[in-house]
Amino acid sequence: MGSAVWTWARRRARWIAAALIALPLLGAVPSVWLYASTADGRHAAADAPRRPVAIVLGAGLTPSGEPTPFLAGRLDIAVDLYDRGKAEAILVSGDNSRDDYDEVGGMRDYLVAAGVPDAKIANDHAGFSTWESCVRARRIFGVGAATVVTQDFHLPRAVALCRAAGIDTAGVGDHQGDTYPTDSAYGYLRELPAAVPAVVDSAVRPDPTFLGPRESSVAEALRAPRD
């Protein structure tokens, strides 16, 4: 009897050890898929293909209402794409769910201060997540092709989700790992669990929190002349 119990305990220990090894590997599968499936769509700004629209995803404001360093990095890339003629309009997508927090307004002000004409910028105030920003860009703003701009650690997920939303998507990522190593490392770690719902959203394609009528602001920004 003692031998049988010992044998069972050893087998149980092996199963637990195997599970502890297998679960992290299985958890990494969605992230690996995101990286592999978007390898052809991730570029440096200088090498990015031309797309009519650059979509800048929100990354928060400071208490003073200025873009955080990560968001400022994304906006700088959008300015670069615009100046290079690789984007004709910029769609800023972020959170304006509270009257006292206007992420999109802060993004727009930053772009205008950097020299992008106000008429070349469109606002999406209900981009509450990566998926919602992408699906609203397609279904509300009529974006069919775009370059999505975000941090490099977030870029595979952003490109994959915008493609799943029906947008011909390229992507450019901002790298600030040398300046903000801790925040960047956290960003890479966060992407591992975030990849799981991203794969689900790609397959299920849920509606965003807010839909509503089509908006013409992106089309108007594309038609507006460069000053």
Image: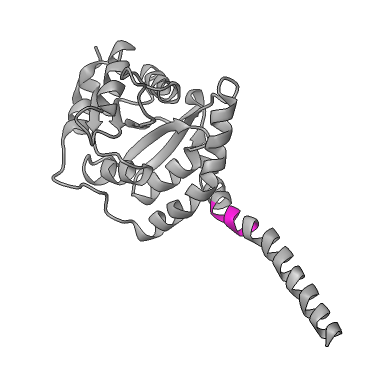
Q: Position of residue 52 (x, y in %)?
A: 32, 31
User: Which residue is rendered at x = 35% and y = 36% of the image?
Assistant: 146
Q: Position of residue 113 (x, y in %)?
A: 30, 11
Residue 53 appears anywhere in the view: yes
Q: Is residue 45 magenta?
A: no
Q: Which residues are magenta?
A: 25-30
Q: Position of residue 11 (x, y in %)?
A: 77, 75
User: Which residue is rendered at x = 86% and y = 83% of the image?
Assistant: 3
User: As rendered, which of 208 and 24 lies closer to the eye?
Assistant: 24
User: Which residue is rendered at x = 19% and y = 47% of the image?
Assistant: 211
Q: Is residue 136 left or right of residue 161?
A: left
**Predominant SS of the magenta segment:** helix
Work out which residue is located at the far right of the displayed protein and give it. Answer: 3
User: As rendered, which of 19 and 108 lies closer to the eye?
Assistant: 19
Q: Is residue 97 left or right of residue 148?
A: left
Placement of 34 over or under 8, stated as above or below: above
Q: Is residue 27 magenta?
A: yes
Q: Position of residue 81 (x, y in %)?
A: 40, 22
Work out which residue is located at the far left of the displayed protein and give it. Answer: 213
User: Which residue is rendered at x = 48% and y = 38% of the image?
Assistant: 154
* Quarter of the view holding residue 20: bottom right
Q: Is residue 73 left or right of residue 20?
A: left
